[in-house]
Image (spheres, rainbow, N blue to C red):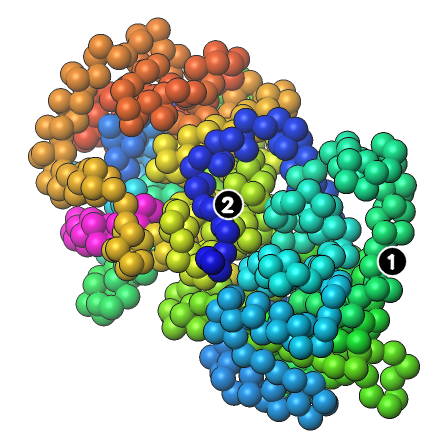
Amino acid sequence: MSFSVMGNEPGSKRIKASLFVTCLVDLFFPQVGESVVRVLRRLGVDVDFPNEQTCCGQPAFNSGYTDDARALAERFVGVFSGDSRDTYIVSPSGSCASMVKVFYEELFKNDPALCDALSKVSSRVYEFSSFLTDVLGVEDVGASYDGVVTYHDSCHLLRELGISEAPRRLIKSVSGVKFIEAEMHDECCGFGGTFSVKHPEVSVSMLDEKLTHIGKSGADTLVSTDMGCLMQIGGAVSRRELPIRVMHLAELLAS
Amino acid sequence: MPSHTFQIDFKRSSKVAVADKKLKRALVSATDRFRAQRSLAVEGTQEWEEIKTRAREIKEHVIDNLDFYLEKLEESITKAGGVVHWARDGEEAANIITAIAAERGVKSVVKSKSMATEEIELNNAFERNGIKVVETDLGEYIIQLAGERPSHILAPAIHKTRDDISKLFSRKLGVPYYEEPEELTGIARDKLREEFLNADMGVSGVNFAVPETGTIVVVENEGNACLCTTLPRVHVALMGMEKVVPRFEDLSIFLNLLIKSATGQKLSTYVSFITGPKNILDNDGPEEFHLVILDNGRSKILADEVTRQSLYCLRCGACLNVCPVYRQVGGHAYGGVYSGPIGAIIMPQLMDLKGVYELPYASSLCGACKEVCPVNIDFPKVLLKLRSDFVKGREKGRRPGLSERMAIKLWRYAMEHRRLYEFISRIAYFAQMPFVERKGRRNGHGRIGSLPFPFSNWTRDRDFPAVAKKTFRNRWRELENENGDSEDKL
Ligand code: SF4
């Protein structure tokens, strides 16, 4: 099926996007990255993948290793500075996008030159769902899926980037989807990066509560926008063999 | 004699707390109730965000000019006939207060709820000096009977069920086992009435202090603070030095924010405005009024540009109520006096104790606290700054273990060298093979059910995803060549 919304009319300039795929997706969940590419291309976006990218430095930053995080942040800015100015940077993670958009500033605050380079890069960074709704102006990407879907708000997407409607609108527009809200859908799933292994008992206790609410909602599919949360929730779903499909928004939209 | 008895080991105590099902039930029902009440009140308030912003600005201004305002406060209170004392740390504050009591032959003290007095462990100091002290807030009274510490800034006995309290009362007070909350409250009231009448000194905390007029404000729901500050002949109030609100007219927004964030009420049942001791116009009130202004690490907090905002806190407790970590473990797991998100940021700044610098890690950085805080404290930023200070060894040489530091260095090196990163990912792919269960459900990918330490911390309760056979970047090499228009092939 070919379904393109904009940018494809003869003579108009195509929208370009560099994929900031995140290390988790690169190493563990390549199918999510593929889904992002598939959806973006379907919408007429030219997708590129700057091959030098690795990790944005968030794990180090969140554990307090600011110097190590700064080194990786600098590297990130360098890698994505190579793009042309009109290229968007799209990431299938609200957490990694917020690292660049919100927290890098903190790391560079004593270096005006870096701040300058950063602002040129960070203003181009979009989380996947908001890129679709805010930049491309799309809600219905032409996907279809047969199931009862609920959405887990990833903390950083919700509270650092303030995005809660975009993913919901995209999900609701998928043909065949019945969308329902779970109770406490905006409560943390307990992942929190290194928190999940530093305090595994607390992390899993939070996760238990999350699973209870998802279970009670009656959904058969859980969708979210961050592989951290999905690894946490999915890890328990698979361990306990719960009858719930866990997937990234991009996977749903590519179906 | 050590000036404190706090023992902080979040890792251990949180594990114990999480296993306590009864505690969990108590916490969930209490925090659910607080959350709902707050939301309702906030939704019904026009311009809530604007009020918050205004309060934040005032707090910033006050903390930037604290010297000036505190001097002004002293001046105004002295003019009103009160006495101001300055305490550098908890021990000094406790000494000042017990000396005031001793010099006046005080035998019995009644206290209203005050986190600052918990911070300096004032009750222990009184008892060491042979002075009887009774908590008169119902929750604090329960905690004192049980010999525990408050587990919530606002609701000190939040971790106790009705059954716990009934048993405690019948054991400690020799009354029959009553179930009904009214009966329990009635018993406490009767006991406390006697204490009020016998007390020679009342101790309270301070919610706000107004330099302009020399007034201190105490907010409460039970009326006990009102009695503590008026019945006995001496009233001593203890305040953290950050509690200043410059002008009387600013109080309205702070009271509004505090009370709604705390309990969702429009106005708490009692708000006492106290300006010096009893004067000729007053019908009641103490003969003497003392205000003890406590530093105890606060000027150190003031010096840090990022963490300074910790001092804006109103102690409303809203951040505890929305914190998913607090909800699992309760206040005692934090080991100190302040718990939840605010505890995780101020404890390490107030007290140099073993384990205290680990508290900023007791958070998933979800930011729910930042969202509800009535003075917009940016918790994730402050937590991250404190973590960073800890890693840098700024805190008297305490820092994370060598293995963690080495692991981060190696990880960083790999992430800085893309080819090495790719190479390691291939090693990991092969190294994981003995652990991978192929029947995994995650899109046909392998799952890992068990890994050696430290990864076992993950795999004990959760499967771990296997490293992909073909990473995204490897797939990209094929994807790239496919024309964007022929998406059907993808
Ligand atoms: S930090 Fe903010 S939310 Fe938490 S107790 Fe203080 S004022 Fe309330």
Query: Looking at this rendering, what residue extends furthest in the bottom direction?
Result: B79
Circle 2: element type: helix
Picture mark count: 2
User: Overall secondary structure of the magenta stretch?
Assistant: helix
Residue A157 lies, in percent from the top left, at 45, 44
Q: Nearer the viewer, residue A41 or B5?
A: B5
Chain letter, disc 2 residue: B
For residue B35, above or below residue B254: above
Q: Is mark 2 within 8 Å of ligand 1?
A: no
Q: Residue at x 63, y 33 (%)?
A: B23
Amino acid under disc 1: Glu
Q: Which residue is mark 2?
A: B334
Q: Residue at x 50, y 51 (%)?
A: B5
Ligand 1 quadrant? Answer: bottom right
| Span highlighted in magenta in the image | A61-83
Please say whether residue A79 is one of the residues in the magenta stretch: yes
Q: Earlier in the sequence, mark 1 or mark 2?
A: 1
Q: Which residue is mark 1?
A: B194
Chain letter, disc 1 residue: B
Of tags 1 and 2, which is closer to the observer? 1
Q: Is residue B445 visible?
A: no
Residue B377 lies, in percent from the top left, at 51, 61
